[in-house]
Image (cartoon, grey):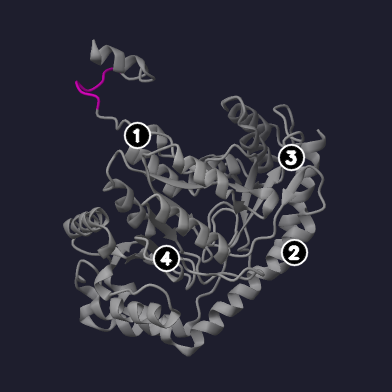
Amino acid sequence: MARAQFANKGHGRYAKTMRGNIVHASAGELSYEIREIVDFGLELEREGIKLVWENIGDPVAKGETIPDWIKEIIMEAIKENSTFAYSPTKGLLETRKFLSTLRTKEGGEKLEADDILFFNGLGDAVSKVYTYLNKNARVLGPSPAYPTHSSAEAAHAESHHLTYQLNPYRNWLPDIEDLRNKIRYNEAISGILIINPDNPTGMIYPERVLKEIVSIAKEFDLFLISDEIYSNIYYGPEKFVSLSQVLDGVPAIVMKGLSKEIPWPGARCGWIEVYNKDKDESFARYIKTINDAKMLEVCATTLPQKVLPKIFSDPRYEEHLKNRRDAYKERAETACKILGEIKGISVVKPSGAFYLTVVFDQDAISGDKTIPIKSEKIKSLIEKKVATLKEGELDKRFVYYLMGGAHICVVPLSGFNTNLYGFRMTLLEENKEKFEKILKDLGEAIEKYLSS
């Protein structure tokens, strides 16, 4: 009977099924719209169109050149045999000491080298942090939510991700009352997630808001997670403050990495910094479990760890970061200038990271709108794809028509665990003229869609 039931649940096209159900109970929670849209985009490109890919935050793929001096440091490291060896499970000691010293200079909670753990990218860290959390312990995260976090948290709990709201009409600031109420009325919530600067919105949590969240965590005996992968990419009026500087004794995990700021996404190098482990026995045991799990994998990649101190301490690095901040600031201003006057959408100028999130007015978007598509073949593919959408997936409909009509690929905002309709694009295009053309084409497509 069990086998027959399993075979009938969407598996009827297969000749047989295994004797046991091998599908994880949370398989449906694993969604990553940022990359899932790629397969359909490639199908369109095989039909002869050339898409502008604005879905994935890879600066290198969008044309950013890594400075020669950084490459020289990496090439020198490759000459050393030790670069090809395992690193200690937690990471190279000299690198962890460097980072702990760096945090001491920044101020805030004390960080020992022993409280830093390296991973193969922050995706690996996110997976471990949620996988080894007690199944009944929930982490409340922001909405819109970055899918790596929301999917991993939902999968560990075998339930939909729990969120607090970021308000697009208040510069994407979190609704603190909503956050507090979610915690007050759900005793399963054991932690709060912050992504700062935020992805997808580009919002930076003001220091006063961070302190409010810390205060709530202290009041309800929660721990905090702060994903700060974009911590060196800020360019708005709001000053970036690391969670580690305002913790007031609350146990926390702060996530950092190399991928976005060198940029070196292919290095797959991220790490967590653990604060106030000694303040809570349960939190300390949880962190030990994460360390033990990493030990089973032996270690993270050695090369990026080896060069990190030399790159970060080089006097040219700060200038490198400043140049990048200035470039993103200029692009953010350009994007808001071109898109900000379009009726039917809301655009908030980002203060950090390298994304722009656009929200459709609720009364401006519906399920019958289109964008003209010249090619009948492409039009047919778009219509077939749109026909598979669930009721209410209105921003996905727009995104598919945008691909077919304007040949631009963005990410539907609904893919970020929110009931808002909109999309996210990047600010990564290096060529100024090309970037402005993308924005103008996008703006025209939005106007055509909303007026159709």
Numbered circle sitting on residue 247: 4
Return the residue found at the far top. Answer: 1
Mark 4–mark 2 contact, CB under 8 Å?
no
Q: Which residue is mark 1?
A: 158
| Side (left or right) of 300 relative to 56 | left
Q: In whole angstroms, how far apart are the C-alphas of marks 3 and 2?
A: 21 Å
Q: Earlier in the sequence, mark 1 or mark 3?
A: 1
User: Depth-wise, is mark 4 or mark 2 nearer the camera?
Assistant: 4
Label 2 CA crowd tier, 10 Å (few <14, some 14–19, many 20+): some
Magenta range = 15-21
Percent coordinates x, y for residue 360 in the rendering: 71, 41
Looking at this view, is 103 or 72 the one in front? 103
Label 3 CA crowd tier, 10 Å (few <14, some 14–19, many 20+): some
Q: Earlier in the sequence, mark 1 or mark 4?
A: 1
| Side (left or right) of 25 relative to 391 | left
Mark 2–mark 1 contact, CB under 8 Å?
no
Query: Which residue is found at the position 64% from the left and 37% from the top?
Result: 395
Label 1 CA crowd tier, 10 Å (few <14, some 14–19, many 20+): some
Q: Which residue is mark 2?
A: 334
Numbered circle sitting on residue 361: 3
Query: Which residue is found at the position 44% from the left and 39% from the top?
Result: 161
User: On the image, which quarter does residue 333 sit in?
Assistant: bottom right
Q: Earlier in the sequence, mark 2 or mark 1?
A: 1
